[in-house]
Amino acid sequence: MRLIFGVLYTFLFLSYITTALFIVFHLLRYSLDRKTAIFGTLFFIVVFVILLFINALIFFSLPFEEFFPAVIL
């Protein structure tokens, strides 16, 4: 069961990163002022990395064995 949730979380994790790259591209490409674009992008990346790290810590601390005690195949 842990493997299934690991695969699903990996897919979710990669989709977060893909979305972040999409946002960074648009922040850099379509900002009117270059300084604002760089500041906004750096701010976004810092907050994104912190939140992604916290998300991963919380996910890996979940007790899957208690959620699904005896899965019989």
Image: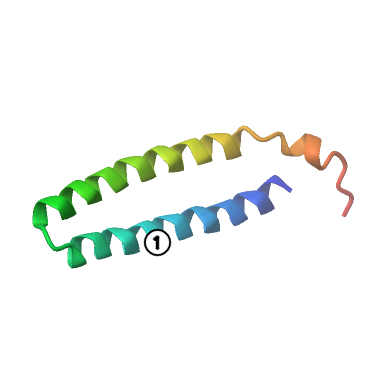
Q: Residue at x 62, y 32 (%)?
A: 61
Which residue is more in the foreground, 27 or 19?
27
Q: Residue at x 77, y 36 (%)?
A: 65
Q: How many marks?
A: 1
Compared across the picture, whether 17 is left or right of 24 comes to right
Q: Residue at x 87, y 55 (%)?
A: 73
- Residue furthest out toward the front: 32
Question: How are the residues colored?
Answer: rainbow
Q: Secondary structure at mark 1?
A: helix
Q: Residue at x 82, y 42 (%)?
A: 68
Compared across the picture, whether 72 is left or right of 28 comes to right
Compared across the picture, whether 12 is left or right of 47 comes to right
| In the image, residue 12 above or below residue 65 | below
Q: Position of residue 1 (x, y in %)?
A: 74, 48
- Residue furthest out toward the left: 34
Q: Position of residue 60 (x, y in %)?
A: 59, 37
Please state which amino acid type lies under the numbered disc 1.
Thr
Q: Which residue is mark 1?
A: 18
Q: Position of residue 16 (x, y in %)?
A: 45, 56
- Which quarter of the figure has residue 62? top right
Q: Position of residue 37 (x, y in %)?
A: 17, 55
Which residue is more in the foreground, 53 or 4?
53
Density class for disc 1 (Cα within 10 Å; few <14, some 14-19, many ≥20) is few
